[in-house]
Image (cartoon, rainbow, N blue to C red):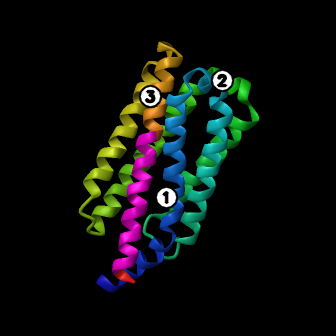
Amino acid sequence: MTQTILKEIKEAVKYWWLLLLTGLLLTAVGIWVFASPAAAYLSLSVLFGASILTIGFFETVFAITASKSMKGWGWTLASGLLDIVIGSYLLVYPTVTMAILPFVLGFWLLFRGFSAIGFSFDLKSYGDLNWGWFLLLAIGIIIFAFMILAVPAFGVANIIAWTGLSFIFAGVFRIILAFSLKKWKSEIA
């Protein structure tokens, strides 16, 4: 049993850097939203579309490369493919997207938050002592997503603030997860 788990982990952690890239991209987008609030709303659909599409690509590659060894890899694949669809939509229809942006982002972040909760419990089953921190960040993502969905009429400032915080939380989650996987890689190599 232990050998099977170690084999699964060893194969999956090879690609820890893909999660680091997605975490850095999510965090950078979140910081940009706060740094450029006036320009942020006008370019949210294009920037987020490109970011979400890129994140979906990396996550899909991670899921496929780790599919033979990672339990629950299908959820990661589904998450990556959903990101590709949403990112493509945001890029193809930027004008329409501006009107529905709070809802698109809110539902996307909600899905990401629930995916992160599932991943947190996967880490718990592997014995990662930091799984609770991952769970806390995942809950933060969900809270911010609900705030975006619940009060889109509060205007651009709220959308920008909650969106920026959500991206930063999602990015920090991925960065910490990547380094956790990197640590596992060195421990089981």
Q: Earlier in the sequence, mark 1 or mark 2?
A: 1
- Assess whether mark 3 and mark 2 are in contact (beta carbons under 8 angstroms): no
Cα–Cα gap, marks 1 and 3: 22 Å
The residue under label 2 is 42
The residue under label 1 is 20
Give the residue at x 63% y 24%: 39
Label 1 or label 3, whichever lies nearer to me, is 1
Q: Name the amino acid, label 1.
A: Leu
In this rendered view, identify the residue nearer to me: 74 or 159: 159
Q: Kindly give the residue lying farthest to the right in the view shown.
A: 92
Residue 113 location, quadrant: top left
Main secondary-structure element of the magenta-colored stretch: helix
Cα–Cα gap, marks 1 and 2: 28 Å
The residue under label 3 is 162
Q: Which residues are magenta?
A: 168-187
Q: Is 176 part of what is drawn in magenta? A: yes
Question: Judging from the image, what secondary structure is the residue with disc 2 in?
Answer: helix
